[in-house]
Image (cartoon, grey):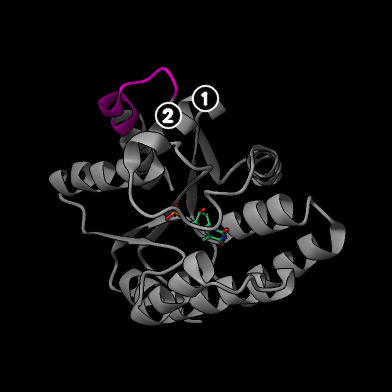
Amino acid sequence: MSPVTGAFITFEGGEGAGKSTQLRLVAEALRQKGHDVLTTREPGGSPGAEALRTLLLFGEAELSPRAEIMTHFAARCDHIDRVIVPALNAGRIVLCDRFSDSTMAYQGYGRAGGEADTLEMIHDLQKLIKISPDLTLLFSASPEVARKRLEGRGGATDRYETAGLAFHERVRHGFEQISAQSPARFRHIETDARAIPEVTEIAAEMILTFLRTR
Ligand code: TMP
């Protein structure tokens, strides 16, 4: 893959941690400072990947664990090829709501409970796609606060949101493990006791500092 000139920044975290709201607000804050920002999401972000998102989140038939992982990566490849790499090559800042750390956390730790073969399969696929985030903001909230935010959100509930508390605890643990393995890439933001504008300010400053010093 040819060298890229933009910055690829991902927002990660469990359900109800506030990352999607923050992604929108941080994008506005960066644009106000003159940056050319593209916002996108996973699973999805391109027409083909959005079709796979519907299958993954709302499809009637549950896929086997390996098929589920491959489908997340199939969606990711379409998104990378058609949206992310062209934007990075145009020098844009790409803010992506979830990326392959979510596959590691949800499928690797949440669904497979951290089983070694599954983690290895996801690692191999991560290497295969040949692109990884320059910076990842990891948002977290306590289960109580996260649940309240989800209840207030409304809308259709997807396959992962309806998984039990134990699943989401494994996901939370997974994100901690993943960030501990790549400390230089991760920045942590705890959102429980912080108002939305304060979180936006912290997140935007983390990104601006990264862009100034890289
Ligand atoms: P969202 O609610 O943040 O839009 O994400 C959709 C759901 O998909 C969320 O519950 C996390 C899940 N997910 C995975 O299980 N694996 C993945 O690789 C990605 C990107 C998301």
Specify the farthest residue to the front: 60
Choose between 85 and 147: the one closer to the eye. 147
Q: Magenta residues?
A: 192-200
Mark 2 surroundings within 10 Å by alpha-carbon count, few (fewer than 14), some (14 through 19), many (20 or more): few
Q: CA distance from mark 1 to mark 2?
A: 6 Å
Report which quarter residue 19 is drawn in.
top left
Judge whether residue 195 is colored magenta: yes
Please say whether residue 23 is visible from this viewpoint. yes
Compared with residue 120, is residue 176 higher up or lower down, i.e. above or below?
A: above
Which amino acid type corresponds to the residue marked 2 in the rendered image? Lys
The kind of secondary structure element at disc 1 is: helix
179 horizontally vs 43: left or right: right
62 horizontally vs 159: left or right: right
Q: Position of residue 182 (x, y in %)?
A: 65, 46
Identity of the residue drawn at 25% across and 27% down: 197
Report which quarter residue 61 is drawn in.
bottom right
Mark 1 surroundings within 10 Å by alpha-carbon count, few (fewer than 14), some (14 through 19), many (20 or more): few
Specify the farthest residue to the right: 116
Q: Which mark is residue 144?
A: 1
Choose between 130 and 116: the one closer to the eye. 116
Q: Which mark is residue 148?
A: 2
Q: Position of residue 32 (x, y in %)?
A: 13, 44
Report which quarter residue 148 is drawn in.
top left
Identity of the residue drawn at 55% across and 29% down: 143
Which amino acid type corresponds to the residue marked 1 in the rendered image? Glu
Q: Which mark is residue 74?
A: none
Please say whether residue 130 is visible from this viewpoint. no
Residues at marks 1 and 2 touching, judged by CB atoms closer than 8 Å: yes
Q: Position of residue 195 (x, y in %)?
A: 31, 22
The kind of secondary structure element at disc 2 is: helix
Q: How many marks?
A: 2
